[in-house]
Amino acid sequence: MTVVINMRDGVDKGKLSVAVRFILDGKLVAFPTETVYGLGADALNEKAVRRIFEAKGRPADNPLIVHIARFEDLTMLAREVPDEAELLVRKFWPGPLTLVLPKRETVPDVTTGGLNTVAVRMPAHPVALALIRESTPIAAPSANISGRPSPTLAEHVIEDFYGRIGCIIDAGKTPIGVESTVIDLSSEEPTLLRPGGLPVEKIEEVIGEVKIHPAVRGKMVEVAKAPGMKYRHYAPNALLILVEGPKGEIGEKITALVREYRSKGFKVGVMATRKYDADEFVHLGSTDVEVARNVFRGLRELDKRGVDVIIAEGIEERGLGFAVMNRLRKAAKYRVL
């Protein structure tokens, strides 16, 4: 039995105490953040963290992000906090920014995927902050079965985990819709490990040029310093085809693909910023912010409608578009360029 707690109207301390007890007892709680829903456990409790990997079917070498609610907790987890980290924390926390730093021995190896670094962020969601503040730093990947689209609604978490975890906090739709941006500050130069809810352009305004890790562009890595670097992620059940290229040509390519797959007897869905004649259609919005908010919902929605093929429209890699395209490329079976 999974307890589902409704907090759509804001933090309720009485209801929250139920979720706090689950965390302190070493059990799993799915909770909202400003990015996506997270599947959380006490970050310093090795046995509790192992339950995350078991529930998700997540590879043990895929590190987790530790969520905190107090600035002083950063020094409790990280052995070193460089000047760039101080600048970014002051500017962007709470918010969708994760920093990778050298870890202290107090952080179990299971939490960091066996690495000597720890990924830390302070979420900008009142429910998440209240839960962490009343309990302990919480290790939390996205609250989905590994490889599936990330959850932006409690209903998505219920689909994947009802009956398998202790508690789900429902606070409605997450406002950003893609995971946090991850910056590695443990190496010689600041490096982007995962684009996300904070555009890298804004980070560079504060600390200067940020190197882009090859994994962001799809290169395979042996060791993942952050989630989303090594394994296939975010994939729907349907065959996902991502269409990229000059804006004027994308429409023609999508129309041709819809016609081709329909002629073969497949039920075809399209996710795009403008309407297409397909069996099913999900409008992603017209701006990068709207597309980011809707991209995971669109993948899950089209799966629910029973399509065989999903054709997704690529968007410009600016602002949140960088994060959107990173997710779609990892999820897609084929890319049409």
Image: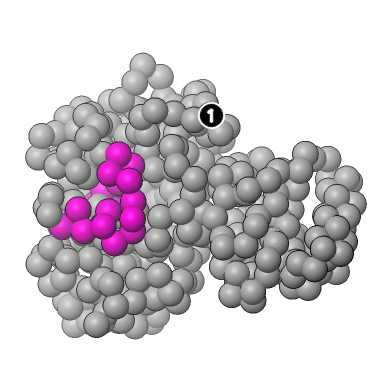
Was residue 57 drawn as part of the magenta stretch in this picture?
yes
Q: Residue at x 89, y 46 (%)?
A: 248
Q: Amino acid at mark 1?
A: Lys
Above/below status of 189 relative to 317: above
| Residue, disc 1 | 219
Number of marks in the rendered image: 1
Tell me which corner region of the image, top left, top right, bottom left or bottom right, holds residue 83. top left
Question: In the shown orientation, is residue 176 left or right of residue 28?
Answer: right
Above/below status of 22 relative to 237: below
Q: Position of residue 238 (x, y in %)?
A: 62, 62
Q: Residue at x 49, y 45 (%)?
A: 232
Residue nearest the viewer, comparing 230 with 92: 230
Question: In the shown orientation, is residue 296 left or right of residue 246?
Answer: left
Residue nearest the viewer, comparing 235 with 289: 235
Above/below status of 81 relative to 202: above
Question: In the shown orientation, is residue 31 left or right of residue 175?
Answer: left
Quadrant of the rendering where the C terminus is positioned: top right
Question: Badge 1: few (under 14), some or many (20 or more) residues near its Cα, within 10 Å?
Answer: few
Q: Position of residue 132 (x, y in %)?
A: 21, 60
Tell me which corner region of the image, top left, top right, bottom left or bottom right, holds residue 330. top right
Q: Position of residue 249 (x, y in %)?
A: 88, 45
Q: Is residue 181 visible?
A: no
Q: Is residue 143 visible?
A: yes
The region drawn magenta spans: 48-68
